[in-house]
Image: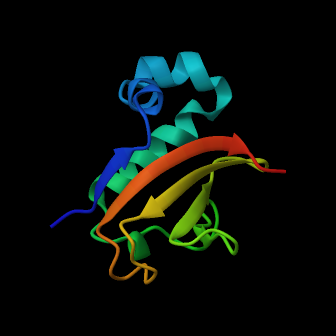
């Protein structure tokens, strides 16, 4: 069974559900965002999202069950699991935000 992903709020759902809207809202990040969403679509678990570049999935140290995936040098897509800390067991995530965390 493929990994399921959802959105933290309706604004993210609207902004990330259509490639044209992604391009309009996120501009130069749009291709990378689409690539990551495509990877989520075919992943079985969060462990299928690589820890090496360009994705560089990494655990957020101060946030429980939370990871980020690189979109650019500064921008990250923050995601949260369904209460499981082991990426090999995570089959459902919520996209929390896309932000410049530097």
Q: Identify the residue at image location x=50%, y=25%.
A: 22
Q: Is residue 86 above or below residue 66?
A: below
Q: Identify the residue at image location x=78%, y=48%.
A: 74
Q: Identify the residue at image location x=63%, y=34%.
A: 29
Q: Is residue 31 above or below residue 60?
A: above
Q: Decide which of 40, 87 is in the foreground and name it.
A: 87
Q: Quadrant of residue 92?
A: bottom left
Q: Quadrant of residue 56?
A: bottom right
Q: How many marks?
A: 0
How far from the left and from the top, in percent, is residue 55? 58, 61
Q: Quadrant of residue 16?
A: top left
- Left or right: residue 102 versus residue 50 is right
How far from the left and from the top, in percent, is residue 5? 32, 52
Q: How is the image coloured?
A: rainbow
How far from the left and from the top, in percent, is residue 31? 54, 35
- Left or right: residue 79 versus residue 99 is left
User: As drawn, which residue projects farthest toward the right?
Assistant: 102
How far from the left and from the top, in percent, is residue 1? 15, 67
User: As drawn, which residue projects farthest toward the left?
Assistant: 1
Q: Identify the residue at image location x=42%, y=76%.
A: 47
């Amino acid at each position: 069974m493929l990994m399921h992903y959802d959105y933290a709020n309706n604004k993210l759902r609207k902004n990330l559900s259509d490639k044209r809207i992604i391009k309009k809202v996120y501009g130069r990040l749009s291709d990378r965002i689409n690539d990551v969403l495509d990877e989520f679509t075919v992943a079985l678990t969060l462990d299928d999202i690589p820890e090496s570049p360009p994705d560089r999935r990494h655990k957020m140290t101060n946030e429980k069950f939370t990871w980020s995936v690189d979109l650019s040098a500064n921008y990250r897509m923050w995601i949260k699991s369904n209460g499981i800390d082991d990426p090999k067991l995570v089959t459902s995530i919520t996209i929390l935000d896309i932000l410049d965390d530097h």
